[in-house]
Image (tube, rainbow, N blue to C red):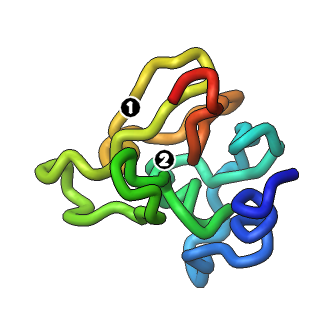
Amino acid sequence: MNKVVQQSVLHPQLQRVAERHRQVLAFQLDGRVVTALRGDTVLTAMLVNGAQLRRNEFSGESRAGFCMMGACQDCWVSKVDGSKLRACSTFVEEGMALLSELPESMA
């Protein structure tokens, strides 16, 4: 496991404090099986399970979303299949496979 993924696993950006009663969904984040709650956006699910949403493609700096309402284009993340989605306006689905960083073969 690389240093960035290890850091991400140890220090989630968000911590859930309410609404814990919703159905639990499993999905993959950077090859790890993690969970979210039905109704969570991909942005919420990724930040509850890691320290970043993605890395800036120009600077390499961590990003965690910006406007949180789909206007700024900062929350695009990749699925394992290479397609992209907007994390702030897409609901997490059972079995999704997401990446907070592109593998070098896709970068």
Q: Residue at x 59, y 83 (%)?
A: 17
Residue identified by numbered label 2: 42
Callout 2: SS: helix
Decide: few, some or many residues near mark 2? Use Cα within 10 Å; few <14, some 14-19, many ≥20.
many
Q: Position of residue 72 (x, y in %)?
A: 15, 52
Mark 2 in CB contact with mark 1 (< 8 angstroms)? yes
Callout 1: SS: strand
Q: CA distance from mark 2 to mark 1?
A: 9 Å
> Disc 2 marks which amino acid?
Val
Residue identified by numbered label 1: 85
Q: Please, which residue is most extreme toward the bottom here? A: 17
When the figure is inspected, residue 101 is found, relative to residue 62, above or below; the finding is: above
When the figure is inspected, residue 25 is found, relative to residue 22, above or below; the finding is: above
> Disc 1 marks which amino acid?
Leu
Decide: few, some or many residues near mark 1? Use Cα within 10 Å; few <14, some 14-19, many ≥20.
some
Q: Residue at x 59, y 16 (%)?
A: 81
Q: Earlier in the sequence, mark 2 or mark 1?
A: 2
Q: Residue at x 68, y 50 (%)?
A: 23
Q: Please, which residue is most extreme toward the right here? A: 1
Q: Left of 22 or right of it: where is 32? A: right
Of circles 2 and 1, the one toward us is 1
Q: Position of residue 59 (x, y in %)?
A: 38, 57
Name the image quarter holding residue 10. bottom right
When the figure is inspected, residue 22 is found, relative to residue 107, above or below; the finding is: below
Using the image as rendered, state which of residue 40 and residue 2 is in the foreground: 2
Q: Position of residue 8 (x, y in %)?
A: 70, 66
